[in-house]
Image: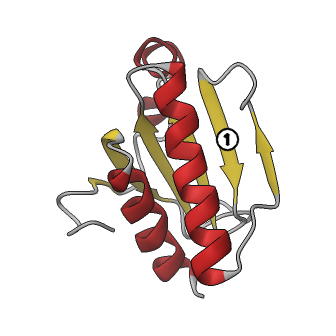
């Protein structure tokens, strides 16, 4: 599975769990350790966990792909899933506003998942 296919599948699973404000940041040529950041929100910590579970289970069962590491599931206000070529950040709205990852990487190409046709 190449990075574009992985990105598409991650976005699909996140959307299935009603992830909000889904953004793809294209980091190819900028970072050496990943191609894409996927940033999305869940309204509550329960929803961020559900988004995490949807991505994890979907990729595991349909594609036999597991993340290299996962952080933040316990607190669930910021869950990071590292799939090497794609790093997923799932935030609660307040935590997303506080860290502002989209602004930090403001110079890289970004698109809303809906603009990309779901991925």
Q: Residue at x 82, y 61 (%)?
A: 68
Image quadrant containing the N terminus:
bottom right
* Above or below for 118 versus 45: below
Which residue, given by chain and number where applicable, does mark 1 sit on? 80
Q: Is residue 65 left or right of residue 1?
A: right
Q: Is residue 119 left or right of residue 90?
A: left
Spot the residue most to the right: 69
In percent of width and height, residue 64 lies at 70, 80
Q: Residue at x 75, y 67 (%)?
A: 66
Spot the residue most to the bottom: 1
Front-most of 88 and 12? 12
The answer to which image quadrant residue 89 occupies is top right
In percent of width and height, residue 42 lies at 42, 30
Q: Is residue 46 left or right of residue 57?
A: left
In percent of width and height, residue 108 lies at 42, 53
Front-most of 107 and 54? 54
Mark 1, residues whose alpha carbon is within 10 Å: few (<14), some, or many (≥20)? many
* Above or below for 60 versus 56: below
**Secondary structure beneath disc 1?**
strand
Number of marks in picture: 1
């Amino acid at each position: 599975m190449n990075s574009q296919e992985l990105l598409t599948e991650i976005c699909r699973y996140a959307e299935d769990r009603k992830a909000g404000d889904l953004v793809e940041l294209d980091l190819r040529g900028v970072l050496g350790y990943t191609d894409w950041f996927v940033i999305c929100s869940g309204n509550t910590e329960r929803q961020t966990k559900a988004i995490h579970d949807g991505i994890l289970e979907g990729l595991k069962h349909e594609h036999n792909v597991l993340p290299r590491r996962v952080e933040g599931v316990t607190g669930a206000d910021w869950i990071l899933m590292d799939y090497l070529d794609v790093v997923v950040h799932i935030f609660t709205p307040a935590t997303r506003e506080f860290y502002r990852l989209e602004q930090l990487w403001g110079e890289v190409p970004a698109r809303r998942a809906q603009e990309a046709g779901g991925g």
